[in-house]
Amino acid sequence: MRKLSEVLVKTGAEIYREIIPVALYSVISSLILIPAVLLLPITAALIIIPFIYMPLFLGVLNVFHHKMERKSRRNGLKDLLAGMRRGYFPAVIMGLFVSLLVFILWSTWWYYGGKEGMFYTIIAVFQTYFVIMAFISQFHTFQLVLQKEMGIFKAMGESVKLLLRHPGYTVGAFFQTVCLTVLLALTAVGFLVLFNGMMGIYMYKVTANLIEEEEEPAADEWSEKGMTPSVK
């Protein structure tokens, strides 16, 4: 398995080569965030994110999944729409999960943050820790849906297993994502123009690296027996 630093270098090179598609599909999928963030109350935004934005985000991931897998020219808009159509249910489930975590985090600090005393602060910190770990545990979910063609619930469970088997790698990858998100969020234009496309490439490479690691023992076992696995 490659080190995370190597994955980051390869991701940067790939983003540079694909900068126009990265910007194009990021803009297309992020336009819905403008009214959601600037004009709507938080409750309405938490509805728009799972039912509209997350399917668009998964569509962008599908575009770059095909680009990375086949290394050939395809109609990216068709891949975007196909990803939204086939992955709408998984995207909504994940969007609802994310919205629930955000709501828990917001309500925790709204309730306990307004109370005096170290005890309430400790409760808020612990709940924040568990919410962050829940986010990290689902870092690979969408890529497992795309790369391994898993159902959403199986992918969510497998993503937790990957975290448990490779905690340092997954936490590091999530931390890099947070850093990138914060940097791009400093300029709203940068976030809208780059974020989704960059995540499409980065998350693909991070998870593909783990999948290759998971599949290598099986391949070695076949080799030791002098056999080759059948091709589906």
Image (cartoon, rainbow, N blue to C red):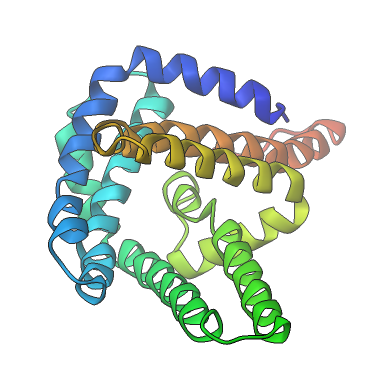
Q: Is residue 57 above or below residue 220?
A: below
Q: Residue 190 at what x, y percent from top left? A: 29, 31
**Would you say 121 lies left or right of 60 here?**
right
Front-most of residues 14 and 107? 107
Q: Which residue in the rendered view is the most extreme toward the front?
A: 116
Front-most of residues 77 and 7? 7
Q: Residue 181 at what x, y percent from top left? A: 43, 41
**Would you say 81 lies left or right of 14 here?**
left
> Residue at coordinates 38% horizontally, 24% vertically from top-left?
70
Residue 123 in view, yes or no: yes
Name the image quarter holding residue 38. Answer: bottom left
Residue 166 in view, yes or no: no
Total tally of numbered discs in the picture: 0
Name the image quarter holding residue 52. Answer: bottom left
| Quarter that holds the N terminus | top right
**Would you say 70 lies left or right of 161 here?**
left
Q: Is residue 121 above or below residue 11?
A: below
> Residue at coordinates 72% horizontally, 27% vertically from top-left?
3
> Residue at coordinates 67% horizontally, 41% vertically from top-left?
172
**Would you say 206 lies left or right of 40 here?**
right
> Residue at coordinates 43% horizontally, 31% vertically from top-left?
201
Q: Residue 129 at what x, y percent from top left? A: 65, 67
Name the image quarter holding residue 15. Answer: top left
Front-most of residues 117 and 15? 117
Q: Residue 225 at what x, y percent from top left? A: 85, 36
